[in-house]
Amino acid sequence: MKYFNRKQNRGAGLSDNDPMTGVANLFDVGLVFIVGLLLALFGTFHLEELLQEDSEITITKQSASGELEIITKKGRKIEAMKVTKKKTSGKGERLGTAYRLSDGTMVYVPE
């Protein structure tokens, strides 16, 4: 019975009833959880291209108020543009025609 009650040498100044001994690893567990969650989100939404340096990707995002935002990534450069309903005027050339299909998708046909 004397072998079961032996205290192990755990270092100078540490006591067995310190409530903070188990809290030290919670930060590490939280970091591992956050990294795993981010990797799962990137895999679910197929956003692996955002992490590649030479990729080109365009994302459109619409808020609850109906405001549309276009996010474009070319290489290492990321741009975000907000689409407004303001009319513009000026000189230019016609590039093509856009059609809205019955299911709501839009098709651009260059000339």
Image (cartoon, helix red, strand yellow):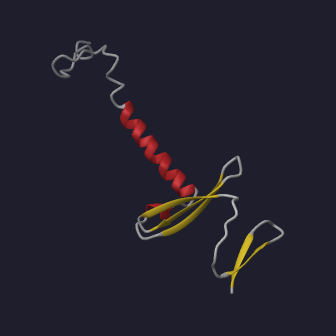
89, above or below 19, in the image: below
* Residue drawn at the location 45% of the way across and 42% of the way down: 34
> Which residue is at the front of the view, 85 or 104?
85
91, above or below 51, in the image: below
As drawn, is 101 to the left or to the right of 92? right
Total labels: the figure holds 0
Q: Quadrant of the C terminus?
A: bottom right
Q: Which quarter of the picture shows residue 14?
A: top left
As drawn, is 24 to the left or to the right of 60? left
As drawn, is 25 to the left or to the right of 80? left
Image x and y of residue 69, in percent: 61, 57
Image x and y of residue 8, in percent: 21, 20
Q: Which quarter of the picture shows residue 98?
A: bottom right
Q: Quadrant of the N terminus?
A: top left
* Residue drawn at the location 30% of the way across and 15% of the way down: 18
> Which residue is at the front of the view, 26 or 48?
48
Image x and y of residue 55, in percent: 46, 70
> Which residue is at the front of the view, 71 or 81?
81
Report the residue that reaches farthest toward the left: 12
As drawn, is 28 to the left or to the right of 107? left
Q: Which quarter of the picture shows residue 19?
A: top left
* Residue drawn at the location 27% of the way across and 16% of the way down: 4
Report the residue that reaches farthest toward the right: 102
Report the residue that reaches farthest toward the front: 90
Image x and y of residue 70, in percent: 59, 61
